Amino acid sequence: MKYIREHLGAKLFLANLVVILVGIGILAITIQVTIPAAYNRHIGMMNQSAMTGMMGPGEGQGQGQGFGKTLFENFRASMFESLAYAVTASVIAALIVSLFLSRRVVAPVRTLTEASQHIAEGHYDERVQVNGSDEIAQLAERFNRMTTQLEQVESKRLQLIGDVTHELRTPLTSIKGFMEGLVDGVLPSTPETFNQIHHEADRLSRLVDDLQELSRVEAGSYSLDLRSTEVANLVQTTIKRLTPQAIVKRIGLRSSLPADLPHVQADEDRITQVLVNLVANAIQYTPDGGDVTISAARHEDEIYISVKDTGIGIPPEHLGSLFTRFYRVDKSRSRNAGGGSGIGLTIAKHLVEAHGGRVWAESLGEGKGSTFHFSLKIAPVNL
Ligand SMILES: Nc1ncnc2c1ncn2[C@@H]1O[C@H](COP(=O)(O)OP(=O)(O)OP(=O)(O)O)[C@@H](O)[C@H]1O
Ligand SMILES: [Mg+2]
């Protein structure tokens, strides 16, 4: 029974069997019911004809089928008559049963067709009811899963449009405000005003670059050039690139790497991009005079690279969301502190995951510094 419930083929086979059995059953019953009457009529007529034959020739001729026929012919005629009724009845019964059964089998397919039409029209909240566990029920379940995902993609898309609009509006409103001030003569035409406008325009162009990079990494439309790479090289390149920013804030930027660290399997440019993101954050969110340290350690077949700072820290409830796009612990603070848009960590996460690694953050709380870690696979030749 369980097998039949779970297999559409078995259901169809059973439906056909039921149709055949119903046909045979009705055939047998109708023959049983109709044959006495047919037999009586034909044989009765034959007897009548025999009796009238005895009475005299000429009478009773041509009055009916039974007259003047042999016993066998009448028997055959009564058989055919009864069979004709039986076949008609059994065909009608089989048609009704097969119509009923095929409707039952086709009904869920029709429901799915209608639901997919609704989805095609953009109604992503459409779901179909899943009955049973056969192939059509499995199809319905997958269909529901697909619509749930479509719904999520659609809501993410709408959210992204909302977020991007919001992010673009801030610098644009600011530039517009400056320009209106200049036109009305409220703001002086000094280099300082122009610098502020330039600063906002710069922020806008960085945001657009970041968004472009984000869409590229989210779509996976880039190729990784994975090679055996020395971690020390990655760290040196990052330090060289960010030393000017660290100097401005009098932040001690150093590295602490064990001497015998195996090479990692990585795309050098991409992982440098990740490290630059993490270290730039560490510098950005650490007050003047703090420290930022890059370290690395082996954990089984992986290397954990960590960026530790003595900065403003992160409250525990935010730790899980930092890698979501546009997420900032304190939006106003990030803007004032140089216009962070909350994309850097999302890009870093995508790049690390493309390498088969993970990225996560730790912090003891506000004012207690933060540490960002990410893992990379050790290069095969080093294992
Ligand atoms: N080292 C850190 N210390 C404290 N908070 C941090 C640190 N790194 C990241 N954060 C928090 O995580 C948020 C997201 O960081 P992310 O790098 O994604 O964006 P951002 O720095 O705001 O902007 P950008 O896209 O320009 O990098 C930051 O806004 C900040 O609130
Ligand atoms: Mg950042």
Image (tube, rainbow, N blue to C red):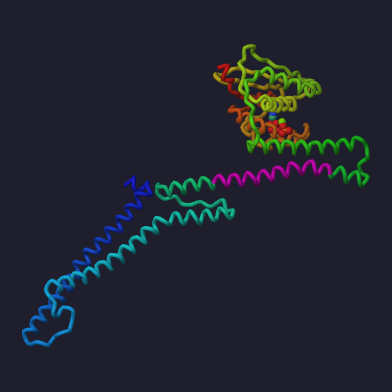
**x 85%, y 37%: residue:** 198
* Relative side of 346 to 38, left or right: right
Name which quarter of the figure residue 213 lies in.
top right
Q: Quadrant of the C terminus?
A: top right
- One can see residue 278 in this view: no
Q: Nearer the viewer, residue 275 or 64?
A: 64
Q: Nearer the viewer, residue 76 or 223?
A: 76
| Residue 181 in the image, given as x and y percentages of width and height | 89, 44
Name which quarter of the figure residue 55 lies in.
bottom left
Q: On the rendering, which quadrant does ligand 1 occupy?
A: top right
Is residue 178 placed above or below 380 in the rendered structure? below
Region of the chain picked out in magenta, as a range:
148-175
**x 65%, y 21%: residue:** 306
| Residue 20 in the image, given as x and y percentages of width and height | 28, 58
**x 81%, y 23%: residue:** 248
| Residue 95 in the image, given as x and y percentages of width and height | 33, 63
* Total numbered labels placed on residues in the image: 0
Instruction: Please tell me whether residue 232 belongs to the stretch shown in magenta.
Output: no
Q: Nearer the viewer, residue 274 or 13?
A: 13
Magenta stretch: dominant secondary structure: helix
Name which quarter of the figure residue 299 lies in.
top right
